[in-house]
Image (cartoon, rainbow, N blue to C red):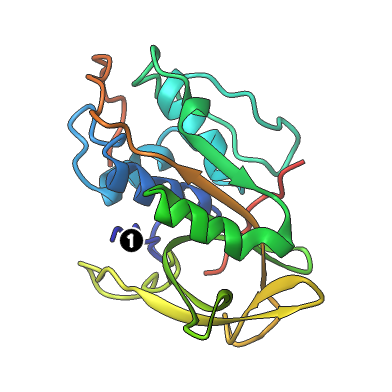
Amino acid sequence: MADAEKTSINTEDDLMCWAAAASNVLEWTGWGKVAGLTNTDQMFAYFQNHWTDEGSLMEYGWELWFSGTYSGPTESGWSQPDVPGGGFYPSQNLYDYFHETWDPPQALSAIDQYLHSGYGTTLAVYFSDSGHAITCWGFQYDTNNPKYYTGVYVSDSDDDENGDSPRPDTLRYYEVKNIGENWYLQNFYGTNNWYIEGVQALAAPLVVPEPTTICLLAMGSLVFIRKKK
């Protein structure tokens, strides 16, 4: 398990839950171990130093990581690359490894499929106009009905935002309930109103390709994740 954490004293990570989740998957799959980066916290720092502190989706972070290009939304409120970077795998096509589902009733089925396929899996969860990104590592189901899901295991970049360093990697379990065809996390940030709208996943390669040599330019709360349009 990987669990990149935001910190309350850092002003460059407030809205970057999506980048933390993307970094967890990059570490777990092996795609992130480039340019001297060895763990999710370093990968998260790389995102912070190459993107504006706004909401986004994991897909766009992985796109820049692979190709060095960005094709995501450009309107206000979306994180944008502000320092050249990425492009670690220009000969690889991200979309040969990328998988997603934006059909809320099918969210748990997608999690089931992606995790059984060995993909690093992230969740886009929403409540009203707020959004958040977390990393999913497992799920529970009713043993009498394997298609009836009862909960998910996740790591969350907000868990130890105000804690002392080094912050622990924490795996949390949330029950889920299917209401009106949406899957709602129970007691997530003190409410039952957050539901899983999107699932984005990245497969690991059989052998991680040798990354392109690139100079590392910089190292170093509840947040918003933008909805896919």
Is residue 51 at least partly visible in the picture? no
In this rendering, is residue 10 above or below 210? below
Give how far across and how far down residue 226 sits, in percent. 68, 49
User: In the image, what residue occupies the spot 78% across and 71% down?
Assistant: 181
In this rendering, is residue 125 above or below 94? below
Q: Residue furthest right?
A: 180
User: In the image, what residue occupies the spot 27% across and 44% down?
Assistant: 42
Amino acid type at mark 1 = Asp
Judging depth in this view, the residue of 31 and 45 nearest the camera is 31
Give how far across and how far down residue 100 sits, in percent. 60, 44
Assign the C terminus to one quadrant of the image. top right
Give how far across and how far down residue 52 sits, in percent. 54, 39
Check disc 1 and report the residue beneath it: 3
Relative placement, left or right, of 26 versus 95 is left
User: In the image, what residue occupies the spot 34% across and 21% down?
Assistant: 88
Please tell me how many numbered marks the rendered image carries. 1
Is residue 103 at least partly visible in the picture? yes
Q: In the rendered image, which quarter is residue 202 located in?
A: top left
Q: How crowded is mark 1: few (under 14 residues within 10 Å), some or many (20 or more)?
A: many
Relative placement, left or right, of 118 versus 105 is left
Assign the N terminus to one quadrant of the image. bottom left
User: In the image, what residue occupies the spot 22% across and 68% down?
Assistant: 165
Please, what secondary structure does the residue beneath circle 1 have?
A: loop
Judging depth in this view, the residue of 34 and 209 nearest the camera is 209
Give how far across and how far down residue 93 sits, in percent. 47, 20
